[in-house]
Amino acid sequence: MTGSLRRRYTLTVAGILAAVIGLMLIAGVLLLRPYYMSHKRSVVRDGYARLNAICSSTSLEESARQEQMREVLQSLFETENISSVVVTGNSVTAQVSFAANADTMLGRLLAYEQMSFLGLRYPEGTEVIENSENFHIIETPQQGNASARLECWGTLGSGAYFLLSAPLESMKESASVSSRFFMVVGFAGIVLGALLAYFQGRRMSRPITQLSRLSEKVADLDFSERYEGRERDEIGVLGNNMNRMADALQETVTELRSANEELRRDLEKRTQMDDMRRDFLNSVSHELKTPLALISGYAEGLSDGINDDPESRAYYCGVIMDEADKMNRMVRKLLTLNDLEFGNEGPEMDRFDLVSMIRSILQTTEVLNPEVRVLFREVDPVWVMADEFQMEEVVTNYLTNAYAHAEGDKIITVQIERRDGVARVTVFNTGAPIPEEDLPKIWDKFYKVDKARTRSYGGSGIGLSIVKAVMEAHRQAYGAENREGGVAFWFEAALAQTE
C-alpha cells in the first residue's frame, strides 16, 4: 500500500506539471502574437489620442505645444520602442521626431499622405487593421532589409501629420526566446515535481509506520503514544480513532490512578489523625495525671481528717484549688488551640495600635514576677492589621515564658521594629539559652525543655503551639533564637495603611 500511494502521488504531480507547462507553451505559440498586436494597437491608438488632444488645444502656445508633443513621443519611444515623426506645418523641417531613421519615416509619412490624396492602394502584403477618418493603423510586410512593422498615421486636429511605427521583428524573437525558455523551465519543473512527489510519497508512508508503533504501545498497555498525522483519508480516520481510543484509555487509567492516590492520601491522613489523636490523648493524660493525683490525694486526706487544724485544711484546699485552676487553664488552651488548628477560629482582621496593646498586657502580667524589670520604650503608635485578640494571645504567651525563665539580671526587653511593610515584635529575657537541638521542637504541643521548671510555674507546653497556630493563620513569620545573655522570641504583623 505504501508503494501504491507513492506512485500515485508521483504520477499525479508529474502529470499536472506536464499539463500546465504544455498549456503554457501552446498559449505562448498561439496567443502571444495576438496579445502583442492587441497591446501595440492600444498603445498607438492612445498615443494618437494624446497627440491629437495637444494639437487641438487652443490655450497652448506653439512652444508649449511642441514641448508636450516631444514628451509624449519620448515616452512612447522609451517605454514601448515606438518611433515617431510629427510634421506640424507646411515645411517638412517643422517636425518633432523620436526615431533613429527620422528621414526614412518622414518619407513613408509623405508617401502615405500622397496615396490617400490620390486614392492609391497600399503596397502588396500590407494589412489594414483599422481605418478611420483621421488615422489609419496598418501592418506592413517585411521588404528587403526593412522588417515588418505596425504603423499608425494620419492627421491631427491642427492639420499636422504624424506617423507612429513599432517593429514586429522583436516580438517574434521574444516569442521564440520565451518558448525555448518555457521548454527548459518546464522540463526542469517536471523533474523537480516528480522528485517532490516521490518524497511526498515517502512522507505518506510515515503515518503507517507511526500507526504500527502506536498499535505496539497499546498492546503493551502504554497509552502515551499519539498519532500526529493530519491526513483526511482512511489512514487519517484510523489514526484519529486510535487517538480517541488511547485518550479514553488514558483518561480511565488517570482516573483510576487519581482515585488510588486520593485513597492513599485518605488512608495516610486517617493514619496521621489516629496518630495525632493517640499522641494527644497520651499527652493530655500525662498532663492531667499529676494534678488529678494531687487533687485526689489531698481530697482524700481532707475526707479522712488527717489534719484537723484549720491551717492544714486551708493548705489542702489551696493545693486542690491550685491544681484545679491549672487543669482549667490547660483545658481552655487546648480548646483554643483546637479551634485554631482546625480553622474554627480564623483571624478577624482589624486595625489597632500595637504599642497600646503591649502596654495593656504588661500592666496585667507584671504581677507574675515582681523581681523582673521590664523595658519597653515605644511611645508613638504602631498601627497594624491583624486579629487583636489572637495577637494578645501571642504577646501574653511570650511574656509569660519570659517572666518564668528570666534569670541573672532578670530583665525583659520588648522592642518593635518596622521593616518591609511589617512590624516585628521581639520579647527578650535574660537567662539560660535554649539548647539548639530543642529550638525547632518548642512549638510542638506539650513539649517542654525543662519539665521540672515548667511544672513549677504551671506551664502546660501549649502556649507556643498557640503562637504557632495564630501566626500561621495570619501567614506571618515568627521564631525564637538564642542571643548573648538570654533568649529572644519574635513575631511579625502587617503594618496598616496610614489613614
Image: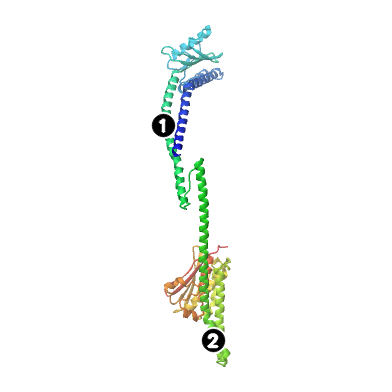
- Residue highlighted by disc 2: 297
* Residue under the point 50% across and 47% down: 242
Depth check: give the residue in front, 105 or 198. Answer: 198
Q: What amino acid type is highlighted by mark number 2?
A: Gly
For discs 2 and 1, the disc positioned in front in the rendered view: 1
Q: Are marks 2 and 1 in contact (CB under 8 Å)?
A: no
Quarter of the picture containing the C terminus is bottom right
Disc ID at residue 191: 1
Q: Is residue 84 left or right of residue 348?
A: left
The x, y position of residue 99, in whole percent, is 44, 17
Depth check: give the residue in front, 32 or 244. Answer: 244
The x, y position of residue 40, in whole percent, is 50, 20
The x, y position of residue 384, in whole percent, is 55, 66
Q: What amino acid type is highlighted by mark number 1?
A: Val
* Residue under the point 42% across and 36% down: 198
Q: Residues within 10 Å of mark 2 (few under 14, many from 20)?
A: some
Residue 169 position by quadrant: top left
The x, y position of residue 81, in whole percent, is 45, 20
Q: Secondary structure at mark 2?
A: helix
* Residue under the point 45% across and 52% down: 220
* Residue under the point 41% across and 30% down: 188
Q: Secondary structure at mark 1?
A: helix
Q: Earlier in the sequence, mark 2 or mark 1?
A: 1
